[in-house]
Image: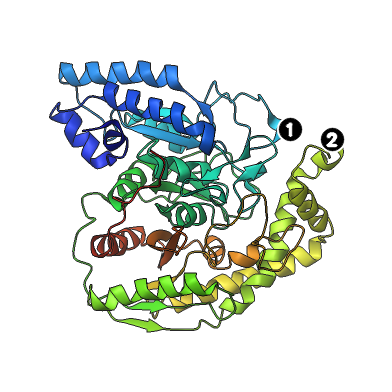
Amino acid sequence: MNAADLCYMPATELAARYRDRSISPVEVVDAVLRRIETLDPRLNALVFPLADEARAQARQAEQAIMRGDVLGAMHGIPLTIKDTQHLAGHPTQIGSPSRKGLVSTFTAPQAQRMIDAGAIVIGKTTTPEFGWKGVSESPLTGITHNPWKQGMNAGASSAGAAVAAAAGYAPLNQGGDGAGSIRMPAHFSGVYGLKPTYGRVPNYPPPASDHTVHNGPLTRTVADSALMLKIMAGPHPWDMHSLESPPADYTGRLHEPLGMPKIAFSADLGHARVDPEVAEIVAAAVKRFEQDLKLPVTQITPDWGPRGPELIRYFWPAHFTQYAALLERSPGQMDQGLAACIREGLETRVSEYVQKRIAKQDYCLAIHRSFEDWDFLLTPAVSVAAFPADRLQPAHWPQHDWDWIMWAEFSYPFNMSGNPAASIPCGFTKDGLPVGLQIVGRRFDDLGVLKLSALFEAAQPWADRRPPLD
């Protein structure tokens, strides 16, 4: 087995190979860290590599195996943490020059749970400034490059995590999603990304975004995401919105029969523009459900869809006014698109906000009512394939000083409504760039989304296809 094969081995297989002692955490972590040293000067996915700590933890993990200790579900497995999540003793900069060097005094609950399960954190991954946009660039860390083509966008605020998954840095990668920031990077980088039901994974500190930020996994296989979610999920006293129910046995139940679910497909949600090549690839993937999996799919145009654009373009700038003080404190250092977004948000009036929030609640109710008729909804994950990362919009799309959402209309509805949703690789463009299919489930049915994803993964595998990096 060569070093690249070791780095691309799924976490579920690593766990089994550790237990039969055919490979060790030391050789895996060494291979991963050598790969990062070679590739990350090109990709720029890690803002803080933690090589010395990771090697020390790998030695301890190997000793525990040799002693015959009881092992955690993630024992010795490499993990990355997004640089919006706190790790005690390490900086949490969230892509902003205003936070450069600020060191965390605590570890976020979801990260702590994975560490307690034995995972080895190899580094923190890059993010746009305060996670504000769907493009993999920040004024602090520069461009995080798409692993399939240098200089191209790797997606939204969890881009570093998706690149780490695609490039073989780690099988397990933590991400966050406030309007698509797990699913969009998964789409652009050709990996699997799951946004769980809101509250499934505890979040601390809570962001000022009106219950839209979800945390979840980015991996190369569905089974690895199931493993991550099982460990990350569950109630926590620091997050009053965390769900009281303990996580399901996502790994043990992943391949249980799904029956004959009612599946709908919407190509545009009744309003979204989609590039023709992306639309064609997604449509072919939807046919797989019918032809290969023998699961009927009904094409629909949801009546709630066209109500989304006005809502997201109101709330997105309004919520980013939490950083308004930085406009005066460090105006030249801030991402200029974020600055424009904040300035628009400063025009928000409280009375108007309350009325818009009522409209948002009605919108979310309409989404949930539509899921009384359907178990799952399929859509494109994103309207475009990767484009140059020094732009907010592809050159052939309308231009705006902050509105990148025009090419990402499929993801934010389910941040507002809290439904579980995943982006699963479903094909490549003629230029060799990945495309993702979105699978949305009923609220609380994270297991169903994982099961349907696993069925599609078996019908159209992707994990053996790697970016041209080696």
Residue 461 horizontal/vertical position (percent): 27, 58
Residue 4 horizontal/vertical position (percent): 31, 35
Q: Nearer the viewer, residue 20 or 387?
A: 387
Q: Which mark is residue 329?
A: 2
Who's the residue at 31% across and 46% down the image?
224
Query: For this view, does 314 lie left or right of residue 298?
Result: right
Query: For this view, does 353 lie left or right of residue 12?
Result: right
Quarter holding the C terminus is: top left
Who's the residue at 58% across and 68% down the image?
409
Name the amino acid type tagged 1.
Ser
Who's the residue at 78% across and 37% down the image?
333
Residue picked out by circle 1: 98
**Residue ranking furthest to the right:** 328
Decide: is 335 above or below 197: above
Name the element at disc 1.
helix
Query: For this view, does 345 lie left or right of residue 438?
Result: right
Q: Nearer the viewer, residue 286 or 465?
A: 465
Q: Residues within 10 Å of mark 2 (few under 14, many from 20)?
A: few
Who's the residue at 63% across and 44% down the image?
137
Say if mark 2 contacts mark 1, CB within 8 Å: yes
> Of marks 2 and 1, which one's residue comes earlier in the chain?
1
